[in-house]
Image (tube, coloured by chain):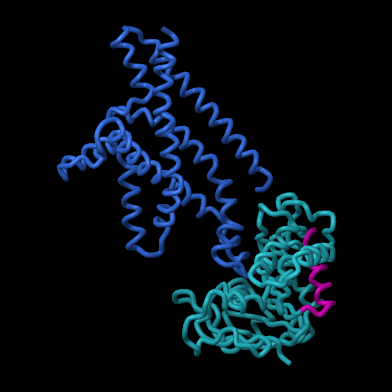
Amino acid sequence: MAILEVKNLKKSFDDTEVIRDISFTMDEGETLTIIGSSGSGKTTLLRCLNFLERPDSGVIRVKDEVLFDSDITGTVSEKDIRNRRLHFGLVFQSFNLFPQYTALENVTLAPLLLAKENTGIDLPAIEENARGLLDDMGLSDRMGNYPHELSGGQQQRVAIARALALHPDILCFDEPTSALDPELTGEVLRVIKDLAGHNMTMIIVTHEMSFAHDVSDKILFMDKGVIAEEGTPEEVIDNPQNDRTIQFLANYKNGM
Amino acid sequence: MALTVTLTLLEGFLQTIRLFILTLLFALPLGLVISFGSMAKAQAVRVPIRFMIWVIRGTPLMLQLLVIYYGPGIIMKSNVWGSGDTGRFIAALVAFVINYSCYFSEIYRGGIQSIPVGQYEAGQVLGMTKHQIFFKVVLLQVIKRIVPPISNEIITLVKDTSLARVIAVYEIIWKGQSFIKSAGIIWPLFYTGVFYLLFSGLLTLLFGFVEKKLSYFR
């Protein structure tokens, strides 16, 4: 059963059509990777899924619940948007940790605020869960440190733990290693690979081709706001059919 | 003589401090309201607020004191400020609050707009409300950034209070100067400088402490 269904999604900024007509589905436990050159609409697509941008038209459905449908008009309350948005988690390129909180507090802040609104949630369990997540990220000795005391790779791993703490159905990554030194990239990719091994449902926008090849169940190649090619890593990366995909991957190999 | 002078100057200094503290008490929060107005999406709010900030920052505080004190009497033919020392003090306070809240509002606006948009977006994708994002994520970062410019402005306020003498609010310099006429001595005037120095020194220490308290994060 598809956990996510995106149908005919469109988004323009002023006169520029960034996402032209995108439809795809993904299954629970799948890792979907989106590749493509800058400006192809990858990041905007993720931002639409996370309600940071409002699509102009289309439908987004998670577990058969309609999260967004441009044909249904009427205002949606802020509370509803928040509840819908919690189906997704997002890890940013620039981490965006909260600088005044420790690693542990970064992870517990949002769950504690949510718990305040719903009674019957076990507060110590939130901290225990956060400690467990940071432990899984290999940060058990960094929980009390502030973001500026951590390396970029450590910060990004805290950000991943922070997103996981809210138990999203689908975790999105927006170029999670693009702001990192090459030697720190590996530690973040390892963590993501680990999550894939535990059947976390993930959508990853990345420029790391060999990583995409290793970790993905499915790859979308985006070009000028449309999905130009999709398939398994073997199909899209090893045996591309579309001219644009071939050209993009060739540029990639030349750059290496 | 030295004792008389000290006591007289202390009396004037009390007036200076009163004006200083009351100005801060009203202008610090009012400045936040004005800064939200100056960032409002609605032009009908933003444009007049920005215009007011431009007028207030673009004209001397001395002129504003005179206009606010004498203006209502000339236009409405009535003294809205009440009579005597209290009336003049209230007029001075109103002028200072308007002037300083405009300056503070620009500092707040700079602080708020310097917070990266990623901080708001991170809060949003974590399901936080606008209110929670402002108070739990953004506010402390804004405070950290505005402490240096605000402390600069506050130390300027200590000295600006002396302008209130233009509408005969008997602050410390007025008192010091009075000895020139009454006793033919000028040193009490210089002595007033010691009060300002000590007080601004105290404030400098205080703000240094606050900055240090907030240095645990970047």
Whether the magenta-drawn stretch holds residue A191 is answered as yes
| Lateral position of residue A131 relative to residue B126, left or right | right
| Lateral position of residue B98 relative to residue A123, left or right | left
Residue drawn at x 66%, y 52% is A100
**Where's residue A47, x and y in %?**
60, 74
Q: Is residue B67 above or below residue B36?
A: above
**Where's residue A215, x and y in %?**
80, 77
Q: Residue furthest bottom?
A: A1
**Residue A128 placement: quadrant:** bottom right
Residue drawn at x 77%, y 83% is A30
Chain B tint as drawn = blue
**Residue A141 placement: quadrant:** bottom right
**Where's residue A169, x and y in %?**
71, 79
Q: Is residue A104 above or below residue B208?
A: below
| Magenta highlight: main SS | helix
Residue drawn at x 57%, y 75% is A79
Rendered cyan, the chain in question is A
**Where's residue A71, x and y in %?**
50, 90
Q: Is residue B103 above or below residue A156?
A: above
Relative depth, front residue between A48 and B132: B132
The magenta span reads A183-200
| Lateral position of residue A164 relative to residue A79, left or right | right
